[in-house]
Amino acid sequence: QLQLVESGGGLVQPGGSLRLSCAASGFTLEPYTIGWFQQAPGKEREGVSCITRADGSTLYADSVKGRSTIARDNAKNTVYLQMNSLNPKDTGVYFCAADWAARDCSPLAFAGYWGQGTQVAVSS
């Protein structure tokens, strides 16, 4: 079965950190562009960060730039999103997705595989 599974979400206080994981089973992530997306309560899903398949270049939304890092571990067939200095606006369900042909970091660019999401709540 081909699937992506996210993990690492949880409840964290403002200023805290989380490392989200996106693990693939049934296929190899290395040839794919991988994206992380946030769906905040009552809002549409938005791109947070992507890492391309071509050269491993990374893209970040302005909202997380400078405090988040996306990285691949091909040996573990997993992509991570390290998020620091979390604030309440980071609250939401975080999804990862994989697509062979994605050209940007918008949800519509990812027609391939999607995970079920992991919940992140930032609150004191």
Image: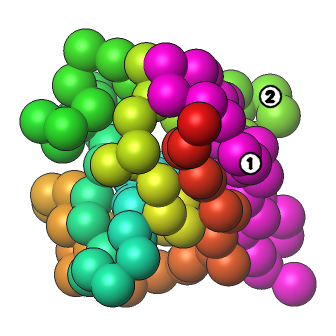
Residue 16 in view here:
yes
Of residues 72 and 61, the one drawn nearer to the viewer in this rendering: 61
- The 10 Å Cα crowd at callout 1, few under 14, some 14 to 19, many 20 or more, is few
Q: Residue at x 47, y 55 (%)?
A: 91
**Amino acid carrying mark 2 in the image:** Ala
Q: Which residues are magenta?
A: 1-26
Between label 1 and label 2, give the one nearer the viewer: 1
**Amino acid carrying mark 1 in the image:** Gly
Q: Residue at x 67, y 78 (%)?
A: 116
Q: Position of residue 47 (x, y in %)?
A: 27, 58
Q: Which residue is mark 1?
A: 10
Q: Which element type, helix, strand or loop, lies under badge 1?
A: strand
Secondary structure mainly formed by the magenta segment:
strand
Q: Residue at x 65, y 62 (%)?
A: 119
Q: Is residue 106 left or right of residue 95?
A: left
Quadrant (top left, top right, bottom left, bottom right) of the C terminus: top right
Q: Position of residue 51 (x, y in %)?
A: 37, 39
Q: CA distance from mark 1 to mark 2?
A: 25 Å
Residue 29 in view here:
no
- The 10 Å Cα crowd at callout 2, few under 14, some 14 to 19, many 20 or more, is few
